[in-house]
Amino acid sequence: MKVKAATPSLLVLAGPTGAGKSQLAIELAECWGAEIVGADSQQVYRHFDIGTAKPPAKLLSRIPHHLISCLEPTEECTAARYVALADEAIADIHSRGKRAIVVGGTGLYLRALLHGLAALPPVDMLLRKRLEAWAEEVGEEALHRRLGEIDAATAARLPRGDKLRAMRALEIFEQTGKPASAHWEEHNFQEERYIHHYIVLSPERHLLYEAINQRVEDMFEAGLLAEIKALVGMGFRDTPAMRSVGYREGLEVVEGVLSEAQARQKMAQNTRHYAKRQLTWFRKEGGARWVALPCNVEALLRYIEGE
């Protein structure tokens, strides 16, 4: 899809979890007269607040936010669903004469929004039923292990409990003979859907890991386990968001598998690994400008306006 000449530009603010995207986006939006569109695969879900590190109410009240707490936890948010929701939000923002800042760390969502969806084969229901029966027989660990054998990049990106997306990746391989991650790699060079500035925050590694470790402690102190217990009570134990980093480890505490101390350590480690995978993804995004932290908001705005 070609970009229309009159399409207003977007500012995309990406980076690993814990880099400080939310706070910087607020400051940029206030200076730039913009509204914020989330690009986080877990923050789209209502009720999952602490473990997804949603911006606190005080920050959300300063600038209008879109695609935060917009779906029920029982709904699936595919890349296609995200693009449809984001397109609608961006069009609304631009119709009111405002600018849009797309903020988040889900690289697949950002790539789909900016470059469109990869040409993947449709779901083959016979193949899906066969894979579902096999997955039920062998279990989640074997399913994830098989995915790692044929598509290590996708296996590294998906939580071990994300059976639906793992099976979809296996389907794509069965249908095309090529890993799903290879399809997305090739798709990175498609035409742009929006004129945009792509900024990736790049904190020093040791500072990022310190921030992640502190975030984990803060989440537990803020009541992560109580939130998980409430979510289980609401019937959301087996929803996609509960399989994400943070909720997965906390659920193991609630169900007596891990001690809280073990879960804190495991969650910090898994979050650091996730941040590393995010950085690897963003390094492959053509045209992205990497910005070291701390970042000067005024200088960043001058760069954006000067392009």
Image (cartoon, rainbow, N blue to C red):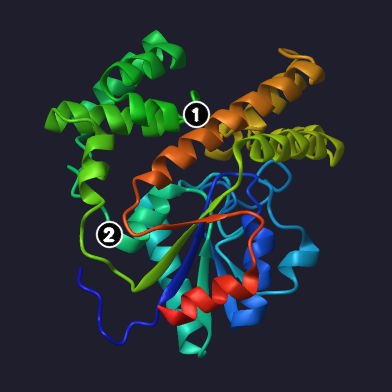
Residue 234 appears in the figure: no
- Amino acid type indicated by mark 2: Gly
Q: Quadrant of residue 235?
A: top right
Q: Quadrant of residue 81?
A: bottom left
Residue drawn at point x = 65 percent, y = 40 percent:
208
Q: Position of residue 44 (x, y in %)?
A: 56, 54
Residue drawn at point x = 69 percent, y = 47 percent:
53
CB atoms of marks 2 and 1 within 8 Å:
no
Image mark for residue 116: 2
Q: Residue furthest bottom?
A: 97
Q: Alpha carbon of mark 2 to alpha carbon of mark 1: how far?
A: 24 Å
Sequence-wise, the earlier of marks 2 and 1 is 2
- Relative to 14, does residue 175 appear above or below in the rendering? above
Q: Position of residue 121 (x, y in %)?
A: 17, 42
Total labels: the figure holds 2
Q: Position of residue 108 (x, y in %)?
A: 39, 48
For the N terminus, the quadrant is: bottom left
Q: Position of residue 181 (x, y in %)?
A: 28, 36
Relative side of 243 to 198, left or right: right
Residue 26 appears in the figure: yes
Depth check, front residue: 278 or 112: 278
For the C terminus, the quadrant is: bottom left
Tag 2: Cα neighbours inside 10 Å, few (<14), some, or many (≥20)? many
- Amino acid type indicated by mark 1: Pro
Residue drawn at point x = 49 percent, y = 74 percent:
303
Depth check, front residue: 266 or 41: 266
Q: Which residue is mark 1?
A: 159
